[in-house]
């Protein structure tokens, strides 16, 4: 029998190429689970949320138009809000224009699936540490729950 096989050098090169390809695939997969650090006022956005973000909420469901007024009581500008009410996946987003200097925003939304409580979470606009792009950061620590 006169069988030929590939040389050990070629076999090693193929194995190295397979390992490198798998490493890149795993890195891409795992990097989707890690979020970029958002910077605001020279500090991590999570620190700014704890120190400088405070909201107060006035809810009036006695009228036909279900009015929610959210006021920024903190020292950092707020870029928007996420309002969660009702069951799983029932949420609304109110995003302000960048540079909007108003101290309050009137979110005209239709609350139809409110199960006793709503959670209102403010968002601040920061900069991604590595990308330099503007990014919204939800301030979960400054969330307010209101009855409806």
Image (cartoon, rainbow, N blue to C red):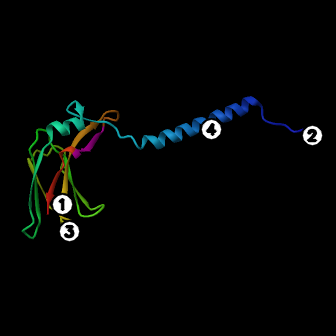
Q: Residue at x 22, y 67 (%)?
A: 113
Q: Residue at x 9, y 70 (%)?
A: 64
Main SS type for the magenta part? Answer: strand
User: Label 3 belongs to which residue?
Assistant: 112
> Sequence-wise, which precedes: disc 1 or disc 3?
3
> Sequence-wise, which precedes: disc 4 or disc 3?
4
The image quadrant of residue 63 is: bottom left
Q: Nearer the viewer, residue 54 or 106?
A: 54
The image quadrant of residue 40 is: top left
Q: CA distance from mark 1 to mark 4?
A: 53 Å
Task: Determine whether label 4 and label 3 are within 8 Å by CB.
Answer: no
> Sequence-wise, which precedes: disc 2 or disc 3?
2
Outermost residue on the bottom side: it is: 64
Outermost residue on the right side: it is: 1
Q: What numbered label is drawn on residue 117?
A: 1
Q: CA distance from mark 4 to mark 3?
A: 54 Å
Observer-side mark, 1 or 3, equals: 1
> Sequence-wise, which precedes: disc 2 or disc 4?
2
**Label 1: how many residues lie within 10 Å, few (<14), some (14-19) or many (20+)?**
few
Q: What numbered label is drawn on residue 142?
A: none
Tell me the magenta residue range.
133-140
Looking at the rendered structure, the secondary structure element under dot 1 is strand
Q: What numbered label is drawn on residue 18?
A: 4
Q: Residue at x 68, y 35 (%)?
A: 14
Q: What numbered label is drawn on residue 1?
A: 2
- Residue 28 at x, y percent in the picture: 48, 41
> Sequence-wise, which precedes: disc 1 or disc 4?
4
Q: Residue at x 11, y 41 (%)?
A: 74
């Amino acid at each position: 029998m006169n069988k030929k096989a590939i040389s050990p050098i070629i076999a090693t090169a193929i194995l190295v190429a397979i390992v490198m390809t798998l490493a890149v695939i795993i890195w891409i997969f795992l990097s989707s689970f890690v979020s970029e650090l958002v910077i605001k006022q020279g500090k991590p956005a999570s620190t700014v949320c704890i120190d400088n973000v405070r909201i107060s909420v006035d809810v009036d469901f006695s009228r036909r138009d279900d009015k929610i007024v959210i006021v920024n009581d903190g020292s950092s500008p707020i870029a928007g809000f996420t309002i969660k009410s009702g069951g799983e996946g029932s949420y609304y987003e109110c995003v302000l224009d960048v540079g909007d200097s108003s101290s309050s925003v009137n979110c005209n939304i239709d609350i139809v699936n409110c199960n006793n409580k709503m959670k209102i979470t403010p968002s601040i606009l920061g900069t991604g540490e590595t990308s330099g792009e503007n990014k919204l950061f939800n301030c979960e620590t400054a969330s307010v729950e209101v009855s409806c």
